[in-house]
Amino acid sequence: MDSASSPLEPRLEVFFLDSDPADTDRKHKTDDHPLRPWSVYWPPLPGSTLHDWLRVECPVALSWRFDPLQPFDRPWQKWTEEARQRGRACPSAVLPIAPLVPDLGVTAYEAEATGTNTLRLTPSDSGSAKQRDIASLLDEKIQEWGMRSVKARSFNYLAPLHLYAAEKPFHSRLPFLDGLRRTNIIGQAYDSIPVHDISGHESKFTLPESGFEFCRVPVPIFNWDVGVVRDTYLPLMEAWLKDRFKSRMVHIYTYNVSIPTNGEVDNVTSRSSKSRLKLHLPEAASDIENGRYRFIGLVDASSLPNFKKANSDTSMWRPLTGPDQDYPLAVCDYRTVDNRDLVPADVVFPHYCDEGYEIKYNRNHRWFYKREMDSSDVIVFKHYDSSKDEASFCPHSAFHDHTVPEGTPTRASVEIRAIVVG
């Protein structure tokens, strides 16, 4: 299918917020703006081959509009499931594990895995002096506290390719279009990345300093399904977050019940935070921007054999299997992250272009997890904080724990993301 269109034709008039509106239609690279490959295809132009094809094959992609009162109506989940069933899921590629160059701490992998886009061999991961000092201080504390560690095999970061100087990284949530990849993200696997077990030392790490906290938040839920998550769990967590942050408003804008993939780095850029406010809280966005607001995530853990998979800032993460987790969630201490480690990436929806960060390897990163989380354990971590006096976000990623007993069931988890105002 030829989806190219004349640039003189008017764009389809859809509600399409963009984290950088000036770049919405940018198709060509400039010195200041890398190419955004998806913008050649979306939004589609009336009369174009793509527009005509969508009218027949996927008309909802043209007609659907986001309703802030129904934030969990997400048709791209159905498209993704259908594509997975057809063998077209197209996950991100991951380059094989590369040895580290001891004096530089960077990979020596130079295979032409992506055409001419070989890896950069520069000591860019040495970090700032402040970052190195904090990493050294944490290492001393880790040893003093006697923390156990897992040396994760195949821990994935964004591959340091020349490609991303020319193309902005992206993930597509659009219908599966001929010619447009689902993502141009390529990971680089690293071996023996230490992930430290925080058990017994949870209080040493806080949201303001580290960007994450491990908490106990029991819930009276024993059978999980879509109805229970929406009708019972979300109201309970909304009330808990409001009390925890003493905030005047909490708005849960998404939830996911899923099994993990390695490399779940998904934090919100400053530009994206303002777009998300306008998307989810259009009536109050201008007022909220003038005060304190946070994007918080919360993830949950429990061992529930009758769990049913649901459809799928501050995040809150709770595992639904356990006590052993084959793919536990690791969080990176914000103080050990350098701005140069972060690469902005587009996340393209039919109505909206979001922006988050992919993260490059840096030897100073310090990762933590909690072994044997149970049904009352949660991880609360930041996606974005408007305050300049605290940690802004928390990189996070699932990793394979090869030390768990053989036969440990595949991990499932429930994550919610919320805007916390005030």
Image: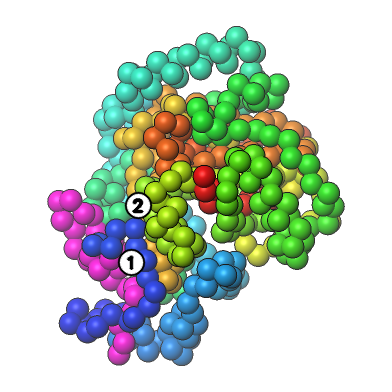
The residue identified by callout 2 is 271
Please name the residue shown 45% across and 32% down the image: 390
Please name the residue shown 43% across and 26% down the image: 336
Q: Quadrant of residue 3?
A: bottom left
Residue 145 x/y as whole percent: 63, 13
Is 328 covered by the magenta stretch?
Answer: no
Residue 199 x/y as whole percent: 69, 25
Tag 1: amino acid: Trp
The residue identified by callout 1 is 38
Checking the image for residue 120, the label placed there is none
User: Which SS does the magenta portion mostly show?
Assistant: loop
Please name the residue shown 42% across and 38% down the image: 387
Q: Are marks 2 and 1 in contact (CB under 8 Å)?
A: no
Q: Quadrant of residue 275?
A: bottom left
Q: Residues within 10 Å of mark 1 (few under 14, many from 20)?
A: many
Among all residues in the image, which is located at the extreme left?
A: 31
Q: Earlier in the sequence, mark 2 or mark 1?
A: 1
Residue 276 x/y as whole percent: 44, 58
Q: Is residue 182 visible?
A: no
Between 193 and 210, the one nearer to me in the picture: 210
Please name the residue shown 39% across and 57% down the image: 286
Against 131, residue 84 (above or below) is below
Tag 2: amino acid: Arg
Between 285 and 6, the one nearer to me in the picture: 285
State the CA–CA distance, disc 2 to disc 1.
19 Å
What segment is highlighted magenta in the picture?
24-47
Residue 355 x/y as whole percent: 39, 54
Q: Is residue 166 visible?
A: yes
Image quarter where the N terminus lies is: bottom left
What secondary structure is found at the residue carrying circle 2?
A: helix
Q: Residues within 10 Å of mark 2 (few under 14, many from 20)?
A: some
What secondary structure is found at the residue carrying circle 1?
A: helix
